Image (spheres, helix red, strand yellow):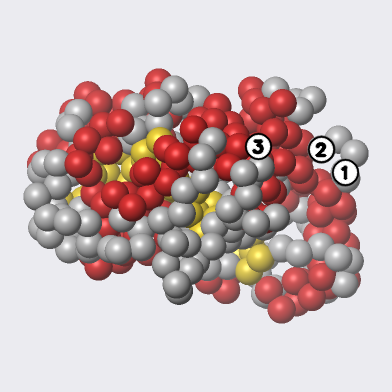
Amino acid sequence: MSHVSPSFAPVFGNCIRLLRQVLYTRDGQPFLVAGSGTLGWDAVGANLIEKGDKALVLTSGYFGDSFAECLKVYGADVTQLTAPIGGSPTKEQITEALKKDKYKVLTLTHDPKMIAETVKEVSPDTLVVLDGVCSVASEEIRFDDWGIDIVVGATQKGLGVPPGLSVLCASQKALKVFENRKTPPSSYYISWSKWLPVMKNYEAGTPSYFATRKPTSLEAPVQLIYALETSLKTIMEGKVSLEDRFKMHREASQRFKKEMQSMGFKTVSLSPETSANGMTAVYFPDGFKASDILPKLLAKDIVVAAGLHKDIKDKYFRVGHMGVSVVDSERDDMDRVIKGVKEAFAEAGYKSS
Ligand SMILES: *Cc1c(COP(=O)(O)O)cnc(C)c1O
């Protein structure tokens, strides 16, 4: 399918409309641009940050540090509020930080409802930026009701599509802040002045090619837009309602965490109430490491990931349970991964007490 084909534009438009539904927003503005989830951080930095703007970055895991690093590239004056490993910043800590200084943006990865409400109470002008790369479509995100200004996402996690598309949604308030910049956006490719008309044209059903008109053309990722439309249609129009989808993720997450605890393993997350529902990070028991277990799982066609967090990188592994692996009742991914992990540890000589 050509990216200039008239039959492609409505598919793109559908993605924009369906994405709004997944995020419970009426007038949030989606941006679908070729790139990875990380490109969304650059979109925030380039479009919303001007040199010296203050940003409060809440860090409750690996990605907070990287988001902070990205915003600094665009000249932000970054303050990080870092929770202990496995925890997340508390309402009291966030309130105190917001009272101490005036921030243009606050970024978070987790617990958006509580945090957005706190921002609304204490510092209503601050833009609430949610790194939802892992959580879009696996966790409830009520963009309008909770007062979120940006959701940064990607296709390859909760949305269940191959990687390659940055999926972002901006509130009208965030777009106003962008329009009122005193300096031009500090990126060419990801500038919203380039992409906003493209999104509007596609939504209206007319193809638009900011990035493809030039001789050195970068094409709209046609296949990924088709794949995203398929996934969004399954999410919004399939057998399982959006509410039930989130409930299934919560149940699968609790089940998996309980199974790991029954083997004597500890989860990295300290509190079940604020644990992610799309994945679980589990500490290896003493004497075991990724290379003892992951290849054994791979031999069973089960892929789990090693650790990332710089302080505990070698001490834990990550298991994703999101999208079709949880929602599609014809698949048995959850049973298989639980059984597989148990067998792999048994083969490696682990005896659960
Ligand atoms: C995976 C992830 C990212 C990075 O996304 P890429 O598509 O790999 O760039 C960023 N933030 C969070 C919360 C993630 O889970």
Tag 1: residue type? Arg
Tag 2: residue type? Asp
Sort mark 2 into few (<14), some (14-19) or many (20+) by Cα contacts within 10 Å.
Answer: few
Which residue occupies 65% across, 57% down? 2
Sort mark 3 into few (<14), some (14-19) or many (20+) by Cα contacts within 10 Å.
Answer: many
Tag 3: residue type? Leu
The reply to whether callout 2 and callout 3 are in contact (CB within 8 Å) is no
- The residue tagged 2 is 328
The percent coordinates of residue 212 (x first, y second) are: 47, 62
Q: Which mark is residue 232?
A: 3
The reply to whether callout 2 and callout 1 are in contact (CB within 8 Å) is yes
Q: Is residue 225 above or below residue 26?
A: below
Q: Is residue 293 above or below residue 62?
A: below
Which residue occupies 54% across, 57% down? 220
Q: Seen in the image, is 271 located left or right of residue 325?
A: left
Q: For residue 12, what is the image quadrant?
A: top right
The percent coordinates of residue 53 (x first, y second) are: 13, 52
Q: Seen in the image, is 330 located left or right of residue 176?
A: right
Sort mark 1 into few (<14), some (14-19) or many (20+) by Cα contacts within 10 Å.
Answer: few
Which residue occupies 22% across, 44% down? 178
Of circles 2 and 3, the one toward us is 3
Q: Seen in the image, is 66 located left or right of residue 176?
A: right
The reply to whether callout 1 and callout 3 are in contact (CB within 8 Å) is no
The answer for how far apart the CA atoms under marks 1 and 3 are is 19 Å
Which residue occupies the foreground of this view, 86 or 30?
A: 30
Of circles 1 and 3, the one toward us is 3
Q: Is residue 35 above or below residue 299?
A: above
